[in-house]
Image (tube, coloured by chain):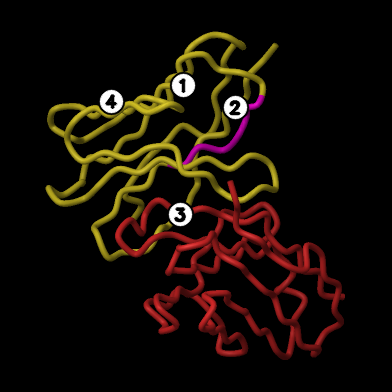
Amino acid sequence: DAKTTQPPSMDCAEGRAANLPCNHSTISGNEYVYWYRQIHSQGPQYIIHGLKNNETNEMASLIITEDRKSSTLILPHATLRDTAVYYCIVLLYGQNFVFGPGTRLSVLP
Amino acid sequence: AAGVIQSPRHLIKEKRETATLKCYPIPRHDTVYWYQQGPGQDPQFLISFYEKMQSDKGSIPDRFSAQQFSDYHSELNMSSLELGDSALYFCASSLSLNPYEQYFGPGTRLTVT
């Protein structure tokens, strides 16, 4: 059973904020939410992670709902180079990453 | 900043041959991970090493083996290659204290003919 559900694809205009949703309704109290992305044929790239609180770094912001059943990754000013597959991963410490299927984000000029 | 280095970047082998992929982690990273990504598929975890010891195992075929050396570089050895082994093989490294912030290399594209 998939732990997360993401839309298969999304479009975003260049310069606008990209908001990528992720549903994880069965998340347990000790499971973290991680976001990675994979630009075509490159290795996956870590973006951000969180447990309960919202998080922000130089790449993105992560908004986790109070009940933790869903989260949103926000790229504040999307550029063409942000076109990639974005993976939302939920896991306990000690588990291994399971990638897929993710959201294919296309940033349009 | 130094990144994960993988070699070779491209490799072509015939069925039943063997292949060795190499990975050089980011300096001071003590944990190495191997992933396989088939055409049109998502990356799949194979195996990981911490301080030269296997720390976890995923869906790695018995025909594959891997090890981590004293300088922390790692090698993935693949024998009796099959057509289905054609894929991108990524190596990632991390600090053991932060295992989920993994830094991936550019990958080795293996083609089995």
Question: Which residue is the site of mark 1?
Answer: A75
Pointer 4: what residue? Answer: A63
C-alpha span from label 3 to label 1: 20 Å
| Real-space Cα separation, disc 3 to disc 2, in angstroms | 19 Å
| Residue at the image point whose x is 51% and y is 53% from the top | B103
Helix, strand or loop at label 2? It is: helix
Q: Report x, y in % for residue A15.
A: 57, 9
The amino acid type, in three-letter code, at marker 2 is: Asp
Residue toward you, B101 or A1 = B101
Residue ID at (56%, 54%): B104
| Secondary structure type for disc 1 | strand
Q: Are marks 1 and 2 in contact (CB under 8 Å)?
A: yes
As drawn, the chain in yellow is A
In the displayed structure, would residue A40 be above or below residue B27?
above
Amino acid type at mark 3: Gln
Q: CA distance from mark 1 to mark 4?
A: 11 Å
Q: Quadrant of the C terminus of chain B?
A: bottom right
Give the residues drawn in magenta, as a range: A81-87
Q: Which of the 4 quarters of the picture holds residue B6?
A: bottom right
Residue A30 place in picture, x, y as percent: 15, 51
Chain at numbered mark 3: B
- In percent of width and height, residue A89 lies at 37, 47
Q: Nearer the viewer, mark 3 or mark 1?
A: 3
Judge if badges 1 and 2 mark residues of a common chain: yes
Question: Which residue has dot 3 on it?
Answer: B102
Label for residue A82?
Answer: 2
